[in-house]
């Protein structure tokens, strides 16, 4: 048996050599891919972390594919025929894996377009939170309630995306209703003063207080002001509280919904 | 003659209080090594902190140029009292009142800067512009003269058309402050060079805005820094 093995090795020595070389080439390219991708992670360029990370992965994948193709050519496989077969296979896979490819290309578009980056405060569709990871296939958002939501990138591209982190400031709107008996000018004046005194309300763009409508039960005012994005909710909440306090202090009523009821007396015959 | 004697060194044994016309700063010794600092504007508490200082270390409050405040902004948007029309190749000079902040010193070290009456404004669009500290004549006039300073802004028009200047955005980093003989704050000046109605360069200068008799003490060193106003004047 040993003799048969020895004979087989002698007859196929060239084939064994070629397969060994192919495996060695793949192993070498695997380590080269790791070494080649390391400098990318250390690059001191102005690029978002998720872009650098995905670039690193792409470089490793490309180097590894080159290694595999080199190994196949050493083994003696016809690359031309392989590429033609790969083309047809790609067509079939493309049709079968539409969703995956859609997510992949959407991910590329997200990274290149710079729509979102890690740390952004966003709302995608009806879900809001902080972006934790932007990958080639999906985006991970930590919702305000603490859960982690992973969204396929095709869904991110297809949804309305509000990015609250891109703006330094946002405009808040507060509706205030005062009674018909109230002095409108006085109400506008005191509200303006409250806005002027607050550190959280920007002086420019200038806040505005408009008389919006004459409602069924009240005169409706629309208060608009700008606040720094990081304190937007705090500013809005504080202003609602301060506006109520100052209107009460000035004797300006915020009325409840009201109806005037007319009772008609039946005429006795 | 006005004298801002509140800007001085003091040693806190038990409690000390300084009133700066609407702004009060109180120091209360909590222990041998710790002092509680409380700053109020009217009845509203604007700052509270604890300072590690023994009774042998002098504490001082001194005026400081407007700082970045809670948002760490880097510019000051000075809204001019009235619009200024500057003819081509002409220079106009305006003096604008700005609030000065309070610098808290322990020995010679600046511990912190406490903003006085901070207001902020957005210059430019919300996504591309800058959040700036805001000042206007209305804002500053309520303050004690010890807490406001006049900044000289030289408006220069190098374009071929008349420019209307409504505001100047000045880099905070370049502003310096001198203390006059009467301990009044003297802030350094700035120059605005208008290239067009929508573009100007504002550069801080090294000299105080007002010339006063006697020697002025330099508290905060100025530097030549430029801000590009690209969203209009």
Image (cartoon, coloured by chain):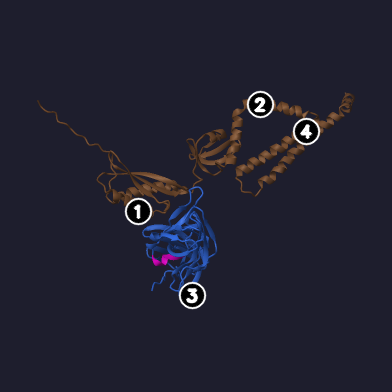
Chain colours: A brown, B blue
Query: Residue at position x 52%, y 39% from top?
Result: A142
Q: Secondary structure at mark 1?
A: helix
Do we see residue A226 in this rendering?
yes
User: How crowded is the residue under tag 3: few (<14 C-alpha within 10 Å), some, or many (20+)?
Assistant: few
The region drawn magenta spans B144-152
**Is tag 4's residue or tag 1's residue first in the polypeptide sequence?**
4
Comparing labels 3 and 2, the label whose residue is closer to the camera = 2
Q: Chain of mark 3?
A: B
The alpha-carbon separation of the residues under discs 3 and 1 comes to 41 Å
Q: Residue furthest front?
A: B160
Above or below A72: residue B194: below
User: How crowded is the residue under tag 1: few (<14 C-alpha within 10 Å), some, or many (20+)?
Assistant: few
The alpha-carbon separation of the residues under discs 4 and 3 comes to 83 Å
Residue occupied by mark 1 = A193
* Residue in front for this viewpoint, A181 or A38: A181
* Residue in front for this viewpoint, A200 or B45: A200
């Amino acid at each position: 048996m040993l003799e048969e093995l020895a004979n087989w090795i002698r007859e196929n020595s060239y084939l064994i050599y070629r397969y060994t070389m192919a495996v060695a080439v793949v192993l070498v390219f695997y380590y080269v891919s790791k070494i080649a991708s390391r400098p990318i992670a250390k690059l001191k360029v102005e690029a978002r972390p998720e872009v650098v990370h995905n670039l690193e992965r792409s470089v490793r994948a490309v180097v590894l594919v080159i290694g595999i193709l080199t190994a196949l050519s050493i083994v003696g496989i016809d690359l031309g025929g392989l590429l033609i077969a790969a083309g047809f296979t790609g067509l079939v896979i493309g049709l079968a894996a539409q969703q995956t490819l859609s997510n992949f290309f959407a991910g590329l578009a997200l990274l290149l377009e710079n729509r979102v980056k890690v740390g952004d405060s966003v709302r995608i569709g009806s879900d809001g939170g902080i972006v934790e990871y932007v990958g080639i296939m999906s985006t991970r958002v930590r919702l305000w309630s603490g859960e982690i939501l992973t969204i396929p990138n095709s869904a991110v591209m297809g949804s309305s995306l509000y990015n609250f982190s891109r703006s330094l400031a946002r405009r808040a709107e507060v509706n205030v209703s005062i009674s018909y008996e109230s002095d409108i000018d006085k109400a506008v004046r005191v509200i303006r003063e409250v806005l002027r005194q607050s550190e959280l309300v920007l002086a420019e763009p200038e806040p505005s207080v408009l008389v919006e409508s004459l409602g069924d039960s009240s005169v409706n005012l629309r208060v608009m002001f700008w606040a720094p994005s990081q304190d937007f909710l705090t500013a809005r909440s504080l202003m609602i509280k301060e506006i109520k306090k100052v209107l009460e202090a000035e004797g300006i009523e915020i009325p409840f919904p009201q109806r005037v009821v007319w009772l008609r007396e039946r005429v006795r015959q | 003659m006005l004298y801002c004697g509140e800007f001085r060194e003091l040693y806190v044994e038990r409690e000390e209080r300084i009133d700066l016309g609407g702004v009060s700063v109180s120091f209360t010794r909590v222990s041998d090594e710790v002092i509680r600092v409380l700053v109020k504007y009217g009845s509203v508490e604007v700052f509270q902190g604890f300072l590690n200082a023994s009774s042998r270390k002098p504490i001082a409050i001194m005026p400081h140029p407007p700082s970045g405040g809670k948002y760490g902004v880097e510019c000051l948007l000075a809204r001019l009292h009235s619009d200024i029309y500057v003819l081509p190749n002409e220079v106009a000079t305006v003096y604008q009142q700005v609030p000065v902040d309070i610098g808290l010193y322990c020995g010679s070290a600046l511990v912190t800067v406490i903003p006085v009456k901070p207001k902020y404004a957005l210059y430019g669009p919300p996504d591309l512009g800058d959040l700036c500290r805001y000042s206007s004549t209305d804002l500053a006039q309520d303050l004690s003269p010890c807490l406001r300073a006049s900044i000289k802004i030289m408006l220069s028009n190098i374009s071929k058309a008349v420019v209307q200047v409504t505001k100047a955005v000045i880099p905070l980093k370049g502003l310096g402050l001198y203390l006059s003989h009467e301990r009044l704050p003297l802030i350094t000046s700035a120059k605005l060079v208008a290239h067009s109605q929508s573009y100007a360069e504002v550069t801080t200068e090294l000299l105080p805005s007002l010339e006063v008799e006697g020697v002025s003490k330099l508290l905060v060193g100025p530097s030549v820094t430029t801000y590009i106003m690209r969203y209009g004047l």
